[in-house]
Image (tube, rainbow, N blue to C red):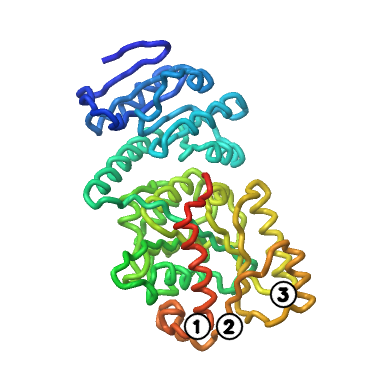
Amino acid sequence: MKDEVAGAVFTSYRSPPPLKQEGEREGGILVVSQTKGMGEMVGRAMLAEQDVGVKIDTRQLSQLVRDEALDLGLYSIVVFEAHPGNDLEMKALRELCGLAGSDTRFLAMTAEQVTLAYAKDLMEAGVDEVLPLAAVRPELRHAVELEGEVGRQIDRRGEDHRDGVIVAVSKTRGGIGATSLVLNLAFCLSGAGRRKKGAPQPRVAVVDLDFQNGNLGSSIDIEDKGGYLELLKGKQQPSFDFLRGTMVRYKDHFDVLAAPVDFAPLDSLTPEVMTLLLSELRLAYDYVVLDLPRALVNWIEPLLARADEMLIVTDTSVPSIRQARRLIDLYTQEHVRLPISVVVSMEKQPFSRSESLKEATNFLERPLEHWLPRDDARAKKAADSGQPILEVSRRSPIAKPLSKLAARIEEIQTNGARREA
């Protein structure tokens, strides 16, 4: 069934959607495209879903903004073609995203390679995912499946749709204890040993993004099931089923995506896949802790746009402080609002700051906020037994500063002051 109105075509595939009660969302798809046949292609991609309405609008985004009759609340997904260099359309996109409700997802399709800066602009405007045109069919279908799955989960259990806090952990040098921080922080965030009786357990994910040299999984005797490597080879897409089949549970504490056994080039992960992966993780978990590689990678951009907290692990040596400053400058070059905290590892916080520490603080233009003392004996015992240090002993000197850091991250979850990305 087709109806042409003011440059728009409404197409309903399979049976027409049933009449909705007042206040109920339509749940259809709005495709904004001037490319001939694009809307029909999207409609065919949705054939696996029943009662999916696809409205095709051939106008420019700037024309849609001026349409007072346009009700974006009728659509669960808005798909549009993105063209770099069109400032007018970018402005209109921001306005449309502002008009839409929080339940409407915006997907940008690109027929050409786009720069990280342009992808960042799209996400900061309110776009949820940036997809290459060649991948639009499977990704759109997954978006609809995910929308339906979330709805079914909410219907069954009241609320199972998470909005996870993303914490990225970077390091100034190897052997600084960043992986240990990731594991022990995840242990704290899971509420192990400090959760009140009867309180729900937070869902925590740990992801080793150093898939060349990462040893996070081996530190707790966990191996990748093979799905991670399939993802890096482009044979798998991040999805609810991917997480369910690939994440490995560490006892009753947190889920782990360990680096694959086989080596993979760091550039085998793309910004588009990273964007999708972060979206899935954020939806499925309350807290997502990412262990970053030391190398500079092109897929860091969507991570910087979405991270709620960046932890830079360092020591107080001059080379490490200099590297910390380089990382801060790199991360904030286009993300000035990115929250960054400096974690001093393997050093006990002094009672009074020496001149060298004052100089380091001034050089970094931020405090040396968190200090994790050395605990060699318990660290060795933890490594030998394949456990986080805090699971070996709650009396470790790192317990108090880590609990403080975890409490700060928990506040991000509860106070609602989240980054827009």
Q: Amino acid at mark 1?
A: Ala
The mark that comes first in sequence, 2 or 1, is 2
What is the three-letter code of the residue carrying label 3? Ser
Near mark 3 (Cα within 10 A), the count class, few <14, some 14-19 or many ≥20, is: few
Left/right placement of residue 316 relative to residue 77 reads right
Q: In the image shown, does 293 or 325 lie closer to the viewer?
A: 325
Tell me which numbered mark, 2 or 3, is placed earlier along the sequence: 3
Query: In the rendered view, would you say 231 is above or below 371?
Result: above
Task: Please provide percent x and percent y for residue 90.
Answer: 57, 29
Residue at image x 55%, y 70%? 178
Callout 2 touching callout 1 (CB < 8 Å): yes
Percent coordinates x, y for residue 278 in the rendering = 45, 50
Question: Disc 2 on helix, strand or loop?
Answer: loop
**Mark 1 to mark 3: distance in Å?**
22 Å
Q: Nearer the viewer, residue 333 or 218?
A: 333
Judged from the image, the secondary structure of the residue bearing numbered disc 3 is loop
The image position of residue 350, as x and y in percent, is 68, 81
What residue lies at 62% left-to-right and 50% top-to-bottom? 337
Neighbour class for label 2 at 10 Å: few (<14), some, many (≥20)?
A: some
Q: Is residue 268 visible?
A: no
Res 254 → quadrant: bottom left
Q: Residue furthest bottom?
A: 377
Q: Earlier in the sequence, mark 1 or mark 3?
A: 3
Q: Is residue 311 above or below residue 118?
A: below
Q: Residue at x 51, y 78 (%)?
A: 400
Q: Residues within 10 Å of mark 1 (few under 14, many from 20)?
A: some
Task: Determine the CA span between mark 2 and mark 1.
Answer: 9 Å
Q: CA distance from mark 2 to mark 3?
A: 15 Å
Q: According to the image, label 1 marks what residue?
A: 379
Q: List the residue tagged with mark 3.
A: 317
Residue placed under numbered mark 2 in the picture: 374
